[in-house]
Amino acid sequence: MGTRLIFSCVFLACLSCPAIAGMPAKLHTEGRWLKDATGKTVVLRGVNKPGYVDVPDGWWNKPGGSLFSGIGTWNPAAVGANLDEMRKWGNVIRFHTCIQWWKDNPSNYRDQYRDVNYPKPYREMLKDVIAWAGERGFYVILDFYNMKQGSDQEAMPWPPFADHRDVVADRDEFVRLWAGIGKELSGFPHVLFELYNEPHGDDKAEAEWFVFTQEAIDAIRAVSDGIIVVQWDYGCWANLDYPPPKNPASTMDWVEKHPLKGENILYSTHLYRTSGGGGGGMVHRTEGGMVSCWKRDDIVKALELTGVHRVALEKPLIVGELGANVRFKGEESHRELEWFGNLLSILNDWQVGYCGWAWDPEKHLMHGMLKDGNFFGGPNEAGKVFLRAVARRP
C-alpha cells in the first residue's frame, strides 16, 4: 500500500508538469471550450485515418505506393511522409483500433494474403506513431472500433451486447482495460481517450453504457487527467416533416439525461447526410418521398432540433465523424458536396471541432477524401471542400 501511494503521488504530480518539448500542450476544458495551459482556446479540426482496424501497423503506404501496399509493412519513413501530408488537413487525427490488438499486443499479423512478423509489437508501433504525430503538432484521438481482427462493429464491447468473451469478458474488464490505457499513454499530453466508437442500443443498453462511462472516467482519472471523449448512438438525425420531440429522432438529449461527474470531458456525435443504408441521414423529409436535405437553413434547423446546437453552446463538443459520399452521381453528388460545405461552414461559425471521415482514397471508402488509388493522390472534390473549410475557420 505504501509503495502504491508513493507511486501515485509522484505520478499525479507529473500530470501538472509542462508539456513535453515539441508536443502540443495538454488540453483541459473550461465551460464549452478546450484550452491549453496558456489559456488559449484550441478548436480541433482534422481527419480520421483508417488503418488500425485493418492491421496492427496502421496501413501507411509510402508515397506513390498502390492502395494496399502499406498493409503488413512497418515503415517509419512512410509513416512520417503520411503525417507530413496530413498536417495540411488540420491539427488532430482520430484513430480507430481493435481491442484485441491492444490487449494481446501482437508482433505478427496473418490473413489470407500475408504472414507478417513485425520488428516490434503493436503498442510500440502505435506509440511511435503517436509520438511522431505530436512532434508535428497533432493531437491524437484514440478509440476502439471493434473487438477483434475481422469482426464487425459491435453495439458495445461486452456481453450480452457482444459475444467475444475471450477479448472482453464483462464490463469490469473493459473498465480495467481503459485504466491501463490511461496509465500507459499518460506520458503523451496530446492524446485524447475516446471510449468506443458509436455505442448504440435500446434503453437498457443506454443506461448500462453510461454506468460504464462513469466507471471508466473514474478509473482513467486515477492515472491521467487527459481529455475523455464520450459518445452515444451512431449520430443525430431528425425528420423536418415530423420533428422531435413529438416524433422519433436521434438527439443529444443523453448529455443531460446522463450527467457525468469529472473534468475534461469532451462530448461527441457523428453527422452524415445519408445513412449509408438507403434511409434518411441527419436531416431529411418524407412527405412526397424520402429526401435527404442539403440546404444550410435545413441543416441549422436539424442541428437545433437534435440538440447539437444547444450542447455546443454549453459543453465542449466535437463532431468525431462527418463526410460526403463521393460515390453519388449527377445531382445527388452536387447535393452531397453542398451539404458537406454547408455543415462545415456552420460548425466553423459555431467554433465546433470536427474530424473528416476519412483521409483515405475514395477507391477504398465511399467517404474517402483523397482521389486516385493511393494516399498521396491529392484531395478529391470532397477533400477540396474540407480543406477550404479548415483554411477558413475562425
Image (cartoon, rainbow, N blue to C red):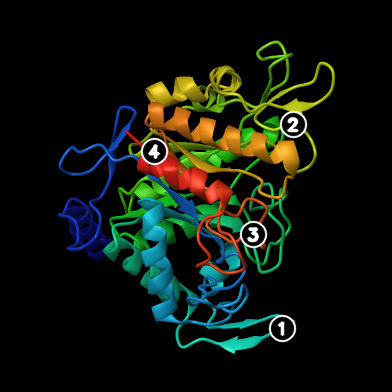
Residue located 67% across and 85% down the image: 114
Going from the N terminus, do you reach mark 4 or mark 2 first? 4
**Cα separation between marks 1 and 4:** 41 Å
Q: Which residue is mark 2?
A: 280
In the rendered structure, are the residues bearing label 3 and label 4 in contact, judged by CB atoms less than 8 Å apart? Answer: no
Between the C-alphas of marks 3 and 4, the distance is 26 Å
Q: Which residue is mark 4?
A: 265
User: Which mark is first along the chain, 4 or 1?
Assistant: 1
Residue 164 point in image, percent of width and height: 70, 62
Residue 260 in view (yes/no) = no
Query: Disc 3 marks which amino acid?
Result: Ala
Q: Quadrant of residue 186?
A: bottom left
Residue nearest the viewer, comparing 216 with 20: 20
SS for callout 4: strand
Q: Secondary structure at mark 1?
A: loop
Q: Quadrant of the N terminus?
A: bottom left
Q: Residues within 10 Å of mark 2 (few under 14, many from 20)?
A: many
- Mark 4 closeness class: few <14, some 14–19, many ≥20 residues within 10 Å: many
Mark 1 crowdedness (10 Å alpha carbons): few <14, some 14-19, many ≥20:
few
Q: Is residue 334 above or below residue 170?
A: above
Q: What amino acid does circle 4 point to?
A: Ile
Structural distance between the alpha carbons of marks 1 and 2:
37 Å
State the residue in front, 390 or 257.
390
Residue identified by numbered label 1: 113
Mark 1 belongs to which amino acid?
A: Tyr
Q: Which residue is mark 3?
A: 169
Q: Evaluate if marks 3 and 1 touch, with contact meaning CB atoms under 8 Å apart.
A: no
**Is 29 rendered above or below residue 79?**
above
